[in-house]
Image (cartoon, grey):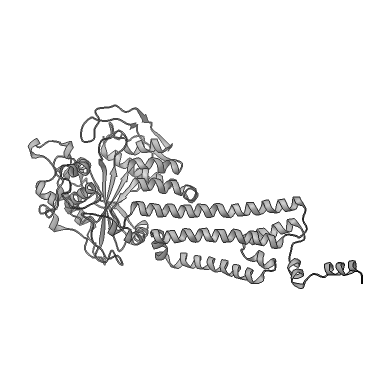
Amino acid sequence: MSRSTRAAGRRAAPRAGRSRARSHRARTASKAIGLTLVSALVPGSGLLMGGRKKLGAFVLTISIGLLLIGGFVALTQRDSVLNLIVSPQQLLIVTAVVVVLGACWIWVVVASHKLLRPVSMTYTSRLAGSMFVGVLCFAIALPTTVAAQSVMAQRNLIGGVFQSESNSKSATRPKVNKQDPWAKIPRLNILLLGADDGVGRTGVRTDTVIVASIDTKTGDTALISLSRNWMRMPFPEDSPLHKVYPDGYWDPHLGNREQPEYYLDSMYDNVPKAHPGILGQTDNEGADVVKLAASAALGLDIDYYMQVNLAGFKEIIDAVGGITVNVNYKVPIGGDYGQGPGTNGHKLPSSYIMPGPNQKLDGYHALWFARGRYGLSDPSRQERQRCTIHALVNSVNPATLITKYNEIAAASQEMLRTDIPQDILGAFLQLGLKVKNAKVTNIDLNKSKNFPTGKNPDYEAMREIIQKSIAPKAGDAQTPPATQPARKPTTTRKPTTPKTTPTPGAAQNLNDACAYNPNETGTGN
């Protein structure tokens, strides 16, 4: 046999292993591209079709297993998922897992294409196959990167806003059982502060002060709004501030008149400046001051605060693409009365947001829609702030959250401040799910009788209304509300509420409250 014949025989009879591997390859480049797409949608299938049966079966098993585990956890382990999304350590692990899984997925696609493509290909076919694989890899890498960045944004948000109990200080925060925080707290009371600080303003004024009292068993929530111009805000008798202001926060030497520098909205800034460190170690003395005063005024143990910088709404609203609101009357942009704490002198508004239904507002105009006050009443301002939040919630959709979550999280990190410890955030999320499906009411404190002006509010009468509103009804299997009679500066008396006063606890529908009504003036008339 000649040498050429022997060489031809060797070429015609390749090794058995190479023949089996080659037999799984696609005969055309287009078919190889189609099979590669299948391998991307069903990781491991391409390796099986390419002859790597053991590796392909392993990858396919892992892929199906991860899907099943993910579905099982999402459907049956809600508490574990809630704890995960508020744990910086676990979120860091999730980020690493997402990156590793994305890299492995890309490797599977590339390896599958190499096994499936024909041995002999034209330059054009090889280029087309490579470009298609590149597109597939990009399609995998993009959502993987977005997911990893979103998880890290969530981690930064949790770490930036919520500190662990050991890494933060509070003069008013309660000690709780981290395993069951609400075991001895039948009602959780949270102080919501809207800080009206920003460019061109001196100090920080908490023009929005609301207490949310939540039944920890049912999630039923009662909202209590405090007026910014209340004077004589009391302090608990066991507080050092009660010794400084035994008759409440006001100056008797100025006489029985309106004292803007002693309004509720000035306490956050003025009291810490006048008496620094009086409450002991704390990260936010102003918030602790308002917590104590609101606690004594309303007769409730206020557990935590959540402070929102209204200026931070601008970035969030721009991130979600604006909000749509009904503007019932002219809302001023700018303007200053020239009186009270934080003023820069009298100044007229630079312009107005004009009335009209379904107006789309960007962050700048939405901010002034919420905070504009010149020539308008405080209740109208509070209502517009609630409508702004309502519109913001309605404007956010899943697509926006996915694509804009980094911007939203960054703005939220700058906007929020709280003494809620990171250690019990999981319990807060679980309680929040109860609140979402429970009853939310607004407690009317009877303005016409109890605080027609800010000079001398009847806090005793308000406390009585609150006690009746949050007390368990007959037949309810609930524990008594968490109140603090020992902290009341004076004994309560039963108020005589006029018949015209709305029933305490009556719910207010935000869709109705925020509807277009051109007959409204915003002045309280």
Of the pair 280 and 328, the residue shown nearer to us: 280
- Which quadrant, please, contains the N terminus? bottom right
**In the image, residue 525 lies at what x, y percent?**
26, 34
Q: Would you identify the image quadrant in which residue 28 lies?
A: bottom right
Let me know if residue 402 appears in the view.
yes
Of the pair 345 and 101, the residue shown nearer to us: 101
Q: Would you identify the image quadrant in which residue 429 lies?
A: bottom left
**In the image, residue 253 lies at what x, y percent?**
7, 37
Left or right placement of residue 350 versus residue 454 in this view: right
Of the pair 350 and 474, the residue shown nearer to us: 350
At 40% across and 41% down in the image, what residue appears? Answer: 315
At 32% across and 61% down in the image, what residue appears? Answer: 423
Left or right placement of residue 438 versus residue 48 in this view: left
**In the image, residue 448 lies at what x, y percent?**
19, 42
Let me know if residue 514 appears in the view.
no
**In the image, residue 184 lies at what x, y percent?**
24, 65
Note whether 190 is above or below 340 in the view shown.
below
Note whether 24 is above or below 230 in the view shown.
below
